[in-house]
Amino acid sequence: MADKLLSRYQELKEQINFHNHRYHVLDKPIISDSEFDKLLNELKKIEEEHPDWITPDSPTLRAGGKPADRFNKVRHPSPILSLANAFGADDAHAWLERIKKIDDRVEKAKFVVEPKIDGLSVVLHYRDGLFVQGATRGDGEIGEDITSNLRTIKAIPLKIPISRELGVGNRKTSSQFPNLDSRIPKHLVVRGEAFIPIKEFEALNKKLEEAGERTYQNPRNTAAGSLRQLDPELTASRPITLLVYQISHCEGGKVPTSQWEILEYLKALGFPVSDVPKRFNDLEKAIEYTETWDKGRDQLPYEADGMVIKIDDLNLASDLGFVGKDPRGAIAYKFPAREVTTTLNDIGVAVGRTGVLTPYAILEPVEIGGVIVERATLHNFDYIAEKDIRVGDRVLLKRAGEVIPYVIGPVVDARKGKEKKFKPPTKCPACEQAVEHIEGEVAWYCVNSACPAQLIRNIEHFVSRGAMDIVGLGIKIVEQLIESGLVKDVADLFTLKKSDLLKLEGFAEKKADNLLRAIEQAKGDALSGSKGQSLNRFIAALGIHGVGEVMANDLARAFGNISALSKASADDLQQIEGLGPNIAESIVDWFKRPANQKVLKKLKAAGVDPQMQKAEGKKQGVLSGLTFVVTGTLPNFSRDDAKEFIESNGGKVTDSVSKKTSYLVLGENPGSKFDKAKSLGVKIVDEAGLKKLVG
Ligand code: IVH
């Protein structure tokens, strides 16, 4: 009996690690989040009964665990080297000339070009295939032991190869690398860069801003800070991932001897490896490729400050030796920095949807990386005070990737004495009401619900894509509607008349008709049977502090309509998993406010009162976490039917096929999406297959 349970336990561990790799490394999940959670829960239950069975590759250890008092020091078995910089093609040529003189083999050398990710360098130790220790680079000789923090990063395999049975492991590795021992080395030390992707960073900041909490300055510092603090649970809550690029040490086995093969080998073992690297026969081509990424760096999902050009032959690279801490066999070809100085002409204050006041820099226009920047974020008033940023200061400005430009700080030495300290406003800049501060938050708020600036943001949010999705209602029109007095709250949108719209500048018949049609679609119509926007979107559209799309989904499922939700107590609300006392309080408070009650009443009178659809409630979640693309004509479903079927079961439908697509739903006469899906190895199902997935 116990034997059977033990083998089930081993099997579960393998399966979970396998699916984790599909999701976090390959970006190609083949099961839904809820199926994954089911496996994990089964594993947890077994571990509760048999804690002695737990090994370092158990996925439950990724949750974090207790904070530590301090980090232990770790001596790296081989020095963790740095890189010399090259600023442009001339420097790169000079590097090649230098090393040609040292070794003749350089003449025929190949080069591998990789992205130079701006993150935190980490060193991962695997003994007998198990992840046993992880460290920071430190001074290159001694780093800090941050194993518990690193274990929370799902992209780091806890065991390599990921799994024999499931085909990612040894068999593939050994057939691909016939000259190597089929076993992996007893002690393998892998180096990589941990980072937060730009999109995840922005989403994190948005969430923090909406909760009135302090936002982070940039992805690099956030990733480094989250890994170099003592609470692994906090690390687990941050969207950190990593890419590896080097084996810095190996004992008891062999590894490939070219950089190109090292990348392939690491990938085959289950490590996340960038797909940007390429190998070239001469430096000229390598430089050309590097420069395409200088121009295209905004396309990279992470911040990169350059590319690394490496001699492919690692024996040659090692024989070339190093200068100080910089190996001669590689150089960092740096992109021009996207940091400039300019004058801070003034500080403006924007009022957000929830009334949060956010200061922004009004700058002397300046070019960074081909873009003219006139505005930049200043995060919050504490930030201005902490950095002592004064109006009139020369400030250092950074733009990285797609991140909104931000002011790093003042150039104190450039001060002339006329710079002025900034006083945060005591009144809202839009409506002049006194601003308030909530205990424990950094943000200041305008609490006047009739504030015109908030109203604009509120309506902008209400009609946005993730909410009521009213197409064609852009910010300009929202401003026009408010300025003309036609719209005083979101409910007024649903009673707009064509004759009113025609009085506005730029509105002709067609534009007015289109807008009114889009509004009608969001509202739905009982007579024609059109359903209008779903309850979860409607809840998300209300803009309740702390209630985003995911929470709105949970609320819709739990309460079924607005009337029930509006009567829920904080206790009722906290029955929902993941909904804590602060959000519960914020929801109760929102429904208590007379102004909100009035708007809800008006919305209902205008016919906006969505109810949870039965099907939505029943099967929600079976496809959650999966992304679908539909192509061709399906036998029974129209496009819209298929979309609704997938969405009502928790899946997502997108228009174009990418690596992230979980399934292509294939009908007759498919378009080019079919070819793309095949070339990317995306799973393909027909209509019947889609229905089967739901069961
Ligand atoms: S190779 C001998 N490759 O850049 C190997 N480094 O400025 C030396 N980095 O400390 C490092 N991406 O943290 C290498 N593809 C990459 C890299 C990379 C980022 C970092 C690394 C290093 C720093 C040097």
Image (cartoon, rainbow, N blue to C red):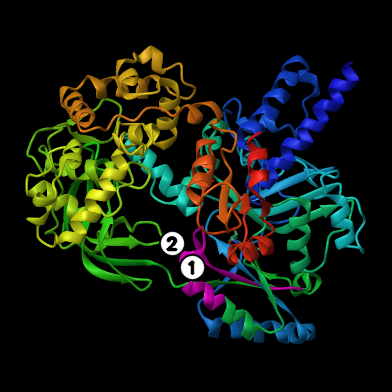
333 is higher (above) or lower (below) than 63: below
**Amino acid type at image mark 2:** Gly
Dot label at residue 140: none
Q: Earlier in the sequence, mark 2 or mark 1?
A: 1
Name the residue that disc number 1 marks. 297
Check residue 31 for magenta coloring. Answer: no
Quadrant showing the N terminus: top right
In magenta, the rendered stretch is 290-312
In the picture, measured across the screen, residue 158 lies left or right of residue 626, that is right
Question: Which residue does the numbered mark 2 point to in the structure image?
Answer: 401
Q: Quadrant of the C terminus?
A: top right
Please provide percent x and percent y for residue 108.
77, 85
Q: Amino acid at mark 1?
A: Arg
215 lies left or right of 278: left
Q: Position of residue 85 (x, y in %)?
A: 55, 72
User: Between 459 and 363, which is closer to the camera in this rendering?
Assistant: 459
